[in-house]
Amino acid sequence: MIAALNGAFDDISKAMRLHRVWIALAHEDIGDQHRRTTLGPLWMLVNYLAFIGTFIFVFKTKDTDSAGYTAYASIGLVVWFYLMEMISLSVPLFSREASFIQGTRLPLFVYVMRLTVQCIIRASYSVAGCIVILLLSGLGISAEWLLSIPGLLLIVLATPAIVMVFAFLGAFFPDAQFIVGNIMRVGTFLTPVFWAYHGQGGIQNYAYHWNPFTYFLEVVRAPIASGEFPTHPFVVTAYISLAFWAVALLLLGGYRKRVVFLI
Amino acid sequence: MISIKLDNVSLAYRLYEKLTLTAPDRRLGGLGGKIGRSGGKQVVQALEDVSFELKAGDRLGLVGPNGAGKTTLLKVLYGIYQPSAGTVAIEGKVDALFNINIGFRPEATGRRNIVLRGLISGWTEAEIQEKMPEIIAFSELGDFIDVPFKTYSQGMAARLAFSAATALDPEILLMDEWIGAGDAQFQEKAKRRMDELAEKAGIIVLATHNESLLESVCTKRMTLKNGRVEAFTTKPAERAGTRAKS
Ligand SMILES: Nc1ncnc2c1ncn2[C@@H]1O[C@H](COP(=O)(O)OP(=O)(O)OP(=O)(O)O)[C@@H](O)[C@H]1O
Ligand SMILES: [Mg+2]
């Protein structure tokens, strides 16, 4: 286990010295996805606005507090889009990078960071859209919004570990791609992205309390939606992140040399 | 001291797809590694007990039929594959040219690809910019350097790949059959550059089916067959004069 951890830290420190590589490649990726389109990466903003616009239009009723719901759903959707995209892209990560993995000696963590940076760049467009919606929603800006920042940072810090765990899962179990894809699709409805939990029983109770995504959403959403720091969700998210890092390091240390034979 | 030493290196690829080989007692063909079983798993024995040693200035040609294990051996030397058994000891900075498309982004221009390739090899942006004019000049791509890589012909891509990789001053250069894509004039130029590299006491390992390339570049020759070393010969003739004494 000590050897595995040493291997993992060796891989990570080599990748950190090559930070220019993953930053450059992530920018290339974003550029490639939107090459020859007129709006370019702004399409990510358009996607987000179209989605959230539809949901607010459909779900907003006269008696719900409309500014509150707009904020609730738009923040929830930013975080959910980020998690969904990150996890779905992680599972086939190593097979997508097969030509680099089979042809260069770059540490695996380079590909993990490349995807991390790519997801963060993409998310920044929807975050910008979300801020605009919040300003237009009439909620009123307050200093409490800043309490979302620790939650955002925590999610960013957890990202490389989550990417790594799902990337190894995808490399060792090719079926994972379909299983995870289904879970994420169902997750859009089972996670309190658009619906709020007010102590209902039944499935919503479980979907709220036993769903790790809930806590990732709440650490960012609660400060803006309800104005207070979400201590309990923050602690749960921190524990989940630590668990992911522990598993990620063991996988990286123990199996990084095997990946090239699997893809 | 630049050197390569392999001791009883073996490498088996596991086959994950179900094979539909009907006859279990099929004869061993002339190609490929041996398909066998180990612990209920189907494996291809791509390398078996490969041992050899190279010293500074050596230029080794790897030959053998398709599937003999040449590419696999180069990837073991580069450190991409960890052998299933045996030890590999390498001293020196290694660079490799496997497949023209590896490490190149089709959408990016030739110039941008040189930058990316440099970053991957651990150079700083400043070092890359410093080498850039020389790389472009050597490749003779001219204005095409600012055109997307995907529009290059095979030979143009090979020129770019070779120019970029050798500008890194590698101490050990591994090359898989591809340089044939360059035209005669470029091959001549590439050969001179490889001579320079070997004279600087570097090591070159070249896998090829091209006898004349082998004749003109290599001083040693290793024949692989079904993953085993069949012959290892040193060319005694006049070329020995250009080899660095070590
Ligand atoms: N990723 C892989 N998975 C399973 N088997 C493989 C893999 N790569 C190569 N092999 C097998 O290993 C053996 C050696 O292949 P290798 O590519 O090293 O041959 P080669 O000498 O480079 O051949 P060529 O002259 O065609 O380039 C072959 O039998 C091949 O089928
Ligand atoms: Mg080959």
Image (spheres, rainbow, N blue to C red):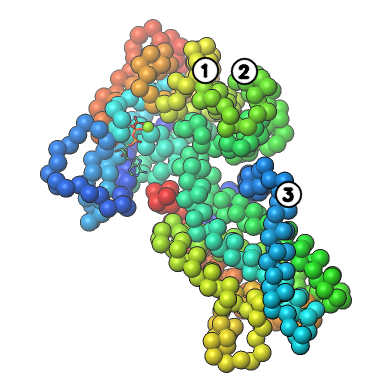
- Find disc 3 in the rendering and name its residue: A39
Q: CA distance from mark 1 to mark 2?
A: 12 Å
Neighbour tally class for label 1: few under 14, some 14-19, many 20 plus, Cα within 10 Å = many
Please tell me whether residue A196 is drawn above or below residue B63 in the rendered image: below
Ligand 2: give its quadrant: top left
The secondary element bearing badge 3 is classed as loop
Q: Residue at x 51, y 36 (%)?
A: B102
Q: CA distance from mark 3 to mark 2?
A: 36 Å
Please tell me whether residue A254 is drawn above or below residue A18 in the rendered image: below
Q: Quadrant of the C terminus of chain B?
A: top left
* Type of amino acid at the residue the image marks with label 3: Leu
Please tell me whether residue A50 is drawn above or below residue B47 in the rendered image: below
Please tell me whether residue A206 is drawn above or below residue A49 in the rendered image: below
- Find disc 2 in the rendering and name its residue: B140
Q: Is residue B66 visible?
A: yes
Whichever of labels 1 and 2 marks the residue nearer the N terminus, that label is 2
> x%, y% of residue A75?
72, 72
Q: Is residue A51 left or right of residue A109?
A: right
> x%, y% of residue A168?
47, 59
Q: Is residue A220 visible?
A: no
Q: Nearer the viewer, mark 1 or mark 3?
A: 3
* Type of amino acid at the residue the image marks with label 1: Ala
> x%, y% of residue A223?
76, 78
Same chain for labels 3 and 2? Say yes or no: no
